[in-house]
Image (cartoon, grey):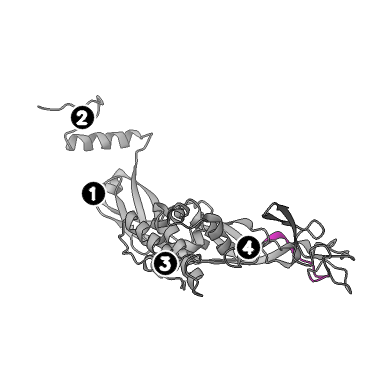
Amino acid sequence: MSSKKDYYEILGVPRDATKEQIRDSYRKLAMQYHPDRNKSPDAEERFKEISEAYAVLSDDEKRRQYDMLGHAGFDQRYTTEDIFRGADFESILRDLGFDWGFDNIFDFFFGRGGFGRRVSKGRDLSYELQITLEEAAKGVEREIEVPRTEKCGTCNGTGAKPGTSPKTCPKCKGTGQVQKVHSSGFARFVQISTCSTCHGSGSVIESPCEECGGTGIVSRKRRIIVKVPSGIDEGYQLRLEGQGDAMLNGGPPGDLYVKIKVAPHRYFQRDGNDLIYELTLSYPQLALGTEVQIPTLEGNTTLKVAPGTQPGELLRLPGKGMPKLNSYRRGDLLIHVNVEVPKKLTQRQRELLNELAKEFGQNVSSGRKFFKF
């Protein structure tokens, strides 16, 4: 189960809270925990929680998905970038007098170094994995092959030839930045720029590694095991932390996002956790009732169709649908009943149908129906 706190609990609002209540709660908590105002050790983490909670609960679609799936299912469908995309907390923070917004929060989540200390990481990668409906129901482990960059094994990612090591950049003294000071009267201006000698790394390589050319990374095809949980649906993304591209100069690697695609099924259409099966029967079968074999995810089962069942009715087999993600509960199998009208009839069949129509007092010869007023 997810160890995250409930978003409603984080903001201190009920589950039926209005958008205005959610916004007001975020304003109050942002003022209390914003790191520019609150210097306590846990302020940054608390501010991260309330910002994430607000980004989800202030968006109608994200809130609906969270209410339906909970943290575990929601986190598999949305990346952190997706969560914050479109949120309006920046305008709220500026209204409160804090002179920064989205970039600062983005740095906190993705920089891995706190506010104002963004640490670059490798490029995130994406991979589309197609599975069957049966695999989506049961869960599956798949081995995929992903082309990516990895730390060079020859130089261990340093970029320097074995037996040598990078040297501190003589121009920036290892800071990766250079400063230029300009004075004008009583004013003093400091211009900071990336060091042109080491390109911001703080070190220079005099003897580059022959394997990676001094970059510290090489291109490889890596086989990775992907564990797909039961109940997963089309469009979900599985985040594999650290399985993306390596970063130059020893930074952390990116992540791999595996997007799930479920192949069309020969029998079923999926509607959330329910499955829909189209059952076509003849008029006599619907009128008199029948027993038919229908498919399920576990094999065929017998369905009793009651006499007088109407075309368009939905018959239900409880618990024969898809498992709910991260739950033991299952949806239902819904059988949509259709009637088959034969396009060609034998002479005997036509005679029998005409006799039946007479029994019902129906005129079928002219194709017209008369009403009495």
Q: Say which amino acid is labelled 4.
A: Arg
Q: What kind of element bears circle 2?
A: loop
**Mark before the other along the chain sequence, 3 or 1:** 3
The residue identified by callout 2 is 363
Left/right placement of residue 100 relative to residue 10 reads right
Front position among marks 3 and 4: 3
Marks 1 and 2 in Cβ contact (< 8 Å): no
Task: Say which of 19 and 331 sits in front.
Answer: 19
Separation (CA) of disc 1 from disc 4? 69 Å
- Residue 58 falls in which quadrant of the image? bottom left
The residue identified by callout 4 is 118
Please, which residue is most extreme toward the front here?
Answer: 185
* Region in magenta: 145-156
Separation (CA) of disc 3 from disc 1? 66 Å
**Mark before the other along the chain sequence, 2 or 4:** 4
Q: Position of residue 147 (x, y in %)?
A: 72, 58
Separation (CA) of disc 2 from disc 3? 80 Å
Front position among marks 3 and 1: 3
Q: Say which amino acid is labelled 3.
A: Gln
Separation (CA) of disc 1 from disc 2? 22 Å
The residue identified by callout 3 is 32
The residue identified by callout 1 is 308
Front position among marks 1 and 2: 1
